């Protein structure tokens, strides 16, 4: 019993130390104020927005990309795989309300098990410009986003740019709990990894790269059977010696999980993917969650009870740091203990499953991160020619 108590206390103390380090790293890394961008004419950019369904606040998220303080021309290409997709309405509304250069691609051709990548492959025919900026449909940005991203891409030796992100609950309490996990768990972990040189992220929040770089790594089709396509793109960009830049600011990831079940499916997919790609990193991140270990140690031996308030205080420092630099709050602080126990439970579950749920399909994840679809729709449409339609209106700068 003494050995068990000692081990639990050791993990709790290590987790508390990690939380203090992560709070400091967040505070020192993320800068809310814009940085100098470049001197000279801003290059033209195509924003690629693969869409699926009528997400809450979709029109507002897309609209943020139309109000950029950016001097160059900007085109937005939105893509869906079916003519009855609920996202089309938001795109049509934006096109009716603005003079922006917005293209809508409707194309059902599947190029692999990854539906998002298939969408991107189909969208590329409508892309006009040589600088491409891909971001997920649930990303919201500030007016300086494009200038900062394209400015980072212009630096020597940079092959791609990605963005840190914090969580924002868009559809009730469960979505706020999901946002809490991103803001106070995932974001600090990435920042610590960057500060220590242990992380080389490339995330779906933003992937900006030149067309020639994309062509050199095989285009989007090279990643059509990879679940973590963003990570794989980053790896491919680095092969010839280029770097993936991470500017010191965050964008918002709109969480839309309507239920606990949806939240768990979503995060379990993330966990399985990360465990497959980086098993040691996954294990380490799961073991620096101090509150579950502090509670377990106290239950085994009451002498460990002082760890409980210290663990809560350390987590409070992380929350304060993230909220300050992102100018947002994911959820009330008193939710955090429940969130930390949920995170730990899903961490354990990540070792027990071999397949994940993604948009209604069951996908098996291999050790290299590749996926095989168990959805008959994927099998039927993989080599079939789908319906392709491109609508392009508006010529003014976004």
Image (cartoon, rainbow, N blue to C red):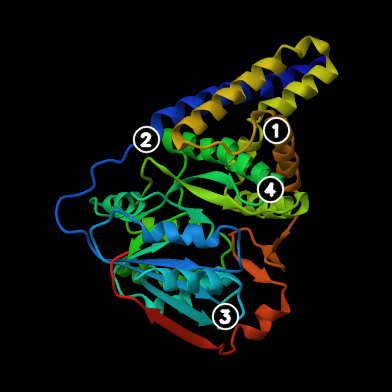
* Residue found at x 63% / y 84%: 381
Pick whichever, 86 or 37, lies toward us. 86
Q: Which residue is mark 1?
A: 335
* Residue picked out by circle 3: 110
Which residue corresponds to mark 4? 172
Camera-near label (3 vs 1) is 1
What is the distance, in whole Å, between disc 1 and disc 2 at their CAs? 27 Å
Where residue 269 appears, as percent x and y from the top left, is 67, 55
Q: Secondary structure at mark 4?
A: loop
**Mark nearer the N terminus (1 vs 2):** 2
Residue 353 vertical placement versus 167 (above, below): below
Indicate the position of residue 156 as horizontal and vertical percent values.
23, 51
Dot 3 or dot 1: first in sequence order is 3
Q: Left of 86 or right of it: where is 350? A: right
Q: Earlier in the sequence, mark 1 or mark 4?
A: 4
Q: Position of residue 84 (x, y in %)?
A: 62, 80
Q: Please name the residue that numbered disc 2 is placed on.
A: 31
Quarter of the figure with residue 398: bottom left
- Distance, label 4 to label 3, CA atoms, is 33 Å
Q: Are marks 3 and 1 in contact (CB under 8 Å)?
A: no
């Amino acid at each position: 019993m003494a050995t068990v108590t000692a081990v639990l206390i050791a993990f709790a103390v290590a987790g508390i130390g990690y939380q203090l380090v992560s709070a400091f790293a967040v505070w020192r890394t993320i800068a809310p104020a814009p940085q100098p961008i470049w001197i000279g004419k801003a290059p033209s950019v195509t924003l690629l927005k693969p869409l699926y369904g009528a997400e809450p606040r979709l029109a507002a998220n897309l609209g943020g990309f139309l109000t950029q303080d950016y001097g160059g021309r900007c085109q937005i290409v939105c893509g869906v795989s079916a003519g009855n997709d609920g996202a089309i309405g938001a795109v049509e509304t934006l096109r009716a309300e603005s003079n922006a250069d917005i293209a809508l691609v409707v194309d059902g051709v599947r190029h692999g098990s990854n539906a998002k990548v298939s969408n991107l492959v189909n969208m590329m025919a409508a892309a006009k410009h040589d600088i491409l900026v891909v971001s997920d449909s649930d990303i919201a940005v500030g007016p300086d986003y494009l200038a900062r991203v394209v400015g980072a891409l212009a630096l020597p030796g940079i092959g791609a740019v990605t963005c840190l992100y914090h969580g924002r609950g868009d559809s009730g309490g469960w979505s706020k709990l999901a946002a809490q996990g991103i803001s106070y768990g995932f974001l600090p972990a990435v920042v610590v990894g960057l500060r220590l040189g242990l992380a080389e992220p490339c995330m779906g929040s933003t992937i900006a790269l030149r067309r020639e770089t994309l062509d050199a790594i095989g285009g989007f089709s090279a990643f059509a059977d990879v679940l973590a396509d963003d990570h794989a793109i980053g790896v491919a960009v680095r092969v010839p010696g280029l770097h993936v830049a991470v500017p010191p600011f965050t964008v918002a990831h709109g969480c839309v999980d309507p239920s606990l079940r949806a939240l768990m499916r979503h995060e379990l997919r993330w966990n399985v993917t990360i465990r497959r790609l980086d098993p040691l990193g996954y294990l380490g991140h799961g073991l620096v969650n101090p509150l579950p270990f502090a509670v377990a140690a106290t239950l085994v031996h009451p002498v460990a009870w002082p760890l409980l308030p210290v663990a809560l205080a350390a987590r409070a420092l992380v929350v304060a740091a993230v909220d300050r630099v992102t100018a947002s709050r994911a959820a009330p602080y008193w939710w955090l203990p429940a969130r930390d126990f949920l995170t730990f439970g899903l961490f354990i579950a990540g070792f027990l499953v071999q397949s994940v749920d993604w948009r209604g399909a069951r996908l098996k994840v291999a050790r290299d991160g590749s996926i095989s679809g168990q959805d008959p729709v994927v099998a039927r449409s993989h080599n079939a020619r789908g319906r392709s339609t491109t609508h392009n209106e508006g010529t003014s700068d976004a």
